[in-house]
Image (cartoon, rainbow, N blue to C red):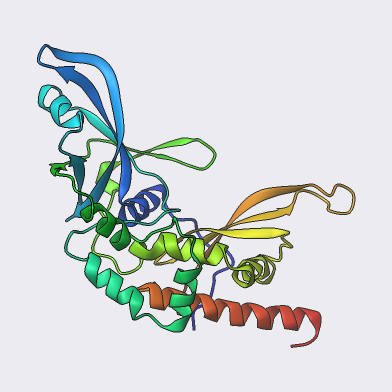
């Protein structure tokens, strides 16, 4: 049975970056504008798709996009990948297998995935929509020279590339956005997140949402009292980390552990109320 550690250690910034890359499939590419006369010292930005192969990002750039000309004159560029609140694609050869895995998932997993909003797609669904377009693309290898993580407060954290572990083939992160959105769209799951805060952190939250998931656990953003709730009933948003005792191998495993935490949390609440 999975157990959440009350005094959980937050994920390292490097680990968070790896999770974002592994779960994502869309990014904003920035290159230096150029023509046959050279660099213009201006930045051109557009949204592109990407995948990860053996730890290296490969960009899927439309054939008529200006980036293709810009990089011939000036190879410099930057890639902005956003937190996987919308999950995506990392390998050309796995989308059909991921789609099959989702369709064959147990009721618990499929119920959460189906609760996700219509605009929230898994990486396999994103790639399938890309293939359905009548467009041509170039595949560009993106060599990472530096990496910066920007947290939810807007603070920047430089990542040492020596400590950065590249994403690998994954059976959970491709579904992370749909799992997060499915949980947040479900009232009973949202109430369970509020219960988690009380059962494992002894905090009474007014509301809570799933912020992110990974193999080792998940992060919850909860609206909790700030100071003495009786004399100063003010609330603020605070992040809580819940860590599994053992890593979840895939979406099925993650949901099983999540349900296990709900059962244990309910027992804790019953014990505190005298009904256990």
Camera-side residue of 112 and 64: 64
Quadrant in the picture for residue 45: top left
Residue 242 falls left or right of residue 32: right
Q: Residue at x 23, y 69 (%)?
A: 96
- Residue 126 horizontal/vertical position (percent): 31, 56
- Residue 109 horizontal/vertical position (percent): 44, 76
Q: Is any part of residue 89 visible from this angle?
A: no
Q: Is any part of residue 206 visible from this angle?
A: yes
- Residue 131 horizontal/vertical position (percent): 21, 55
- Residue 32 horizontal/vertical position (percent): 23, 22
**Which residue is at the far front?**
134
**Which residue is at the far bottom?**
276
Camera-side residue of 168 and 125: 125
Residue 263 vertical position relative to residue 83 in the rendered view, above or below = below
Q: Residue at x 18, y 18 (%)?
A: 34
Residue 19 vertical position relative to residue 81 in the rendered view, above or below = below
Residue 5 falls left or right of residue 130: right
Which image quarter holds the C terminus?
Answer: bottom right
Residue 141 vertical position relative to residue 3 in the rendered view, above or below = above
Residue 138 falls left or right of residue 203: left
Residue 233 vertical position relative to residue 179 in the rendered view, above or below = above
Camera-side residue of 104 and 14: 104
Q: How many marks?
A: 0
Q: Residue at x 27, y 53 (%)?
A: 165
**Which residue is at the far right?**
231
Q: Residue at x 49, y 56 (%)?
A: 10
């Amino acid at each position: 049975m999975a157990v959440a550690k009350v005094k959980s250690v937050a994920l390292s910034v490097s680990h968070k970056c790896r999770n974002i890359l592994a779960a994502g499939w869309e990014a904003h590419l920035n290159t230096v504008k150029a023509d046959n006369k050279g660099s213009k010292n201006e930045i051109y930005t557009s949204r592109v798709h990407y995948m990860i192969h053996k730890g290296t990002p490969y960009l899927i750039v439309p054939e008529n996009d200006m980036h293709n000309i810009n990089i011939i004159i000036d190879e410099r560029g930057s890639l902005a990948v956003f937190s996987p609140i919308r999950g995506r694609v990392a390998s050309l050869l796995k989308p059909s297998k991921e789609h099959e895995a989702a369709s064959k998932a147990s009721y618990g997993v499929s119920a959460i995935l189906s609760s996700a909003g219509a605009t929230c797609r898994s990486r396999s669904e994103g790639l399938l929509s890309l293939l359905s377009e009548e467009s041509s693309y170039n595949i560009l290898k993106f060599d990472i020279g530096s990496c910066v993580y920007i947290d939810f407060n807007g603070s920047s954290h430089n990542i040492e590339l020596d400590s950065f572990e590249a994403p690998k083939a994954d059976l959970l992160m491709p579904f992370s956005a749909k799992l997060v959105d499915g949980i947040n769209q479900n009232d009973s799951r949202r109430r369970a997140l509020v219960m988690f805060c009380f059962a494992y952190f002894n905090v009474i939250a007014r509301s809570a949402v799933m912020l992110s998931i990974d193999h080792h656990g998940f992060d919850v953003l909860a609206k909790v009292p700030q100071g003495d709730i009786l004399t100063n009933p003010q609330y603020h948003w605070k992040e809580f980390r819940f860590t599994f005792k053992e890593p979840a191998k895939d979406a099925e495993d993650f949901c099983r552990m999540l349900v296990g935490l709900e059962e244990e949390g309910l027992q804790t609440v019953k014990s505190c109320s005298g009904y256990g």
